[in-house]
Amino acid sequence: MHVTAVSLRDVGVQVGSAKILSDISLDIADGTTMAILGPNGSGKSSLIRAMLGIYPHTGEISLLGQTLPGRGVDWRRIGYAPQRPTSTAGVPATALEVVSSGLLYGRSFRFGAGYRDKAMAALEGVGLAHRAHQSVQTFSGGQQQRVMLARALVSNPSLLFLDEPFSGVDKTSREMITETLTAKHHEGLTIVVVLHELQNLRPLIDHTVVIEHGRIIHRGDAPRVAPGHDDPQHDHDHEHADEYTSFRTPDLEGGL
Ligand SMILES: Nc1ncnc2c1ncn2[C@@H]1O[C@H](COP(=O)(O)OP(=O)(O)OP(=O)(O)O)[C@@H](O)[C@H]1O
């Protein structure tokens, strides 16, 4: 059965006097991967956050057939790894504790049966089971991103939101993240991912939207990448301040 995992109709988000998203309508079919692209500050993270119901919005948002806000959404079926997980470096928690926290939901602070095995399996999936009992404060940026991906996947969700999963991530972690997402994609996971370059995820991407000034300016299939950026030897390990300079709207020519 063809199901729409995410549906937005005429969505707008205003924070204070700032209109940060306008007229957003899109559908994401179950089991597909959608990439959200756009220049720095265009509204990519805001769009993900709006889809998660973090901002009050106008228009209609539904996740897995349930309208937001509402009690109907089963948040255990939805995973989210936010941008720049290195902020977790200040949290004195082990990788196992961080990943286990992905099994807490609602107002309950109780772990269900088998939580430890689930968290270990999620860490195994990103190649970090051997560091389960170490503090995430000692992890590299890429390893922290992998921990946050494991946290997002630990409840075995059917819908996953990722915000810049390759930002500041080393080659080994990039490959591990790609491998994990590829396996999950083949298992039927719906993925919504903010990217500034398609990078390793290009083969998984079914659809793209490009955001500028809080609006969708292009939509279509995976666009061409910038010259050289599809070379496997290309170093994508940009510093955050510079990484968006590689995104240019002309990269999208011909592909959308
Ligand atoms: N809570 C907020 N209050 C006011 N303005 C906000 C808020 N959140 C986002 N914005 C503004 O909305 C715009 C879009 O921000 P957003 O973080 O979504 O962009 P982005 O495309 O994800 O950027 P980046 O690529 O730098 O992560 C920016 O101008 C930002 O300053």
Image (tube, grey):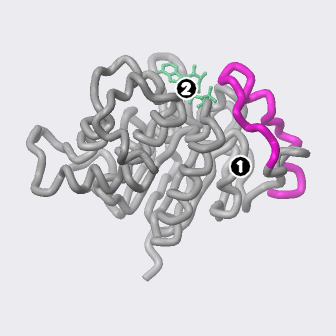
Label 2, label 1: how far apart the Cα atoms are:
28 Å
> From the Cβ of disc 2, is ligand 1 less than 8 Å away?
no
Q: Residues within 10 Å of mark 2 (few under 14, many from 20)?
A: few
Q: Which percent across, then down, holds residue 59?
A: 45, 45
**Camera-side residue of 122 and 36:** 122
Where are the magenta residues, as a range?
A: 233-256
Residue 85 point in image, percent of width and height: 46, 30
Q: Residue at x 46, y 58 (%)?
A: 6
Q: Which residue is identified by label 1?
A: 198
Q: Nearer the viewer, residue 133 or 192?
A: 133
Which quadrant of the render holds ligand 1?
top right
Foreground residue among 69 and 36: 36
Q: Is residue 248 above or below residue 206?
A: above
Q: Does label 2 or label 1 sit earlier along the sequence? A: 2
Type of amino acid under label 2 = Lys
Q: Which mark is residue 177?
A: none
Q: Which quarter of the figure is the C terminus placed in?
A: bottom right
- How many numbered marks does the figure carry? 2
Q: Position of residue 175 (x, y in %)?
A: 61, 50
Image quadrant containing the N terminus: bottom left
Q: Give me the disc on residue 19.
A: 2
Q: Nearer the viewer, mark 2 or mark 1?
A: 1
